Image: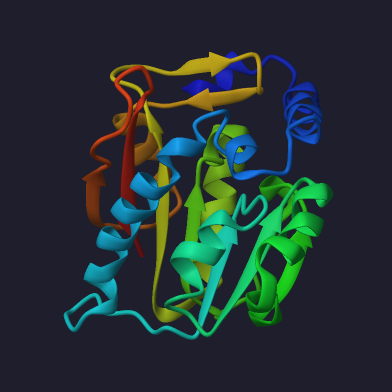
Amino acid sequence: MSTELVEDESQFYCKAKKYWKAVPATVDGMLGGYGHISSIDLSGSKKFLQRFIRDGSHKIGTSYALDCGAGIGRITKRLLLPVFKSVDMVDITDDFLSKAKSYLGEDAKRIGNFYCCGLQEFTPEPNRYDLIWIQWVIGHLTDAHLVEFLKRCKAGLQPNGIIVIKDNITQEGVILDDVDSSICRDMDVLKKIIKQAGLSFLAQEKQENFPEEIYHVFSIAMR
């Protein structure tokens, strides 16, 4: 499993925190220099989310959403606030959350809580959320911490709520990125972790029209 790549857990988390502290609080910074793909990313996410907003057996409410690894609020502003009455944001970098208040403009009034915390230490409020959106951040958790975090997310859902992970997926195996101190897993590894957390799959979809040089990105919905 991917935890074997992490020799020193505390160093793994410290290094990631330090990396993000040095990143500019901009859309380009949030996307590692790929700011130009933001609209493509959001378009794919909107399409994926719509299947759970429309009528159907997996229909969710639209009261509260949680944005995990929220950064300056790129996803909160463009994807979540147009659908949900209120959004909570959690991110490890306080500078990003401070910037979010101006980046979101008038919409900042609809943010319930700004949580400055690593996901390995974060516990969502029980039975609060219709949607928990986790994008490009699970790589900063060890396998064990990801399992436990997803269990806490499960407890944070409304009865019909869902969790969505959108992240890079390797073709095979697990790769450690020493620059930003993150792990990229293949789909089999991720599915085992999700199963360990007691969650079941609802849907998965590959993001289209991304640059060829980056990892494939998938959206995965579960409850």
Where does the image place residue 11, in percent across and percent down from the top left?
79, 22
Image quarter in which the C terminus is found: bottom left
**For this view, does 188 lie left or right of residue 156?**
left
**For this view, does 29 lie left or right of residue 59?**
right
Question: Which residue sits at x=51%, y=37%?
Answer: 35
**For this view, does 63 lie left or right of residue 88?**
left
Where does the image place residue 67, in percent across and percent down from the top left?
57, 61
Q: Nearer the viewer, residue 29 or 170?
A: 29
Q: Nearer the viewer, residue 124 or 51?
A: 51
Image: 35 above or below 157: above
Question: Which residue sits at x=72%, y=29%?
Answer: 16
Image: 121 above or below 21: below
Residue 210 in sight in this render: yes
Q: Quadrant of residue 24?
A: top right
Q: Residue furthest left?
A: 56
Which scheme is used to colour this image of the protein? rainbow
Where does the image place residue 85, in percent across and percent down from the top left?
52, 85
Q: Nearer the viewer, residue 195 or 53?
A: 53
Question: Which residue sits at x=81%, y=35%?
Answer: 21
Residue 141 in sight in this render: no
Image: 132 above or below 209: below
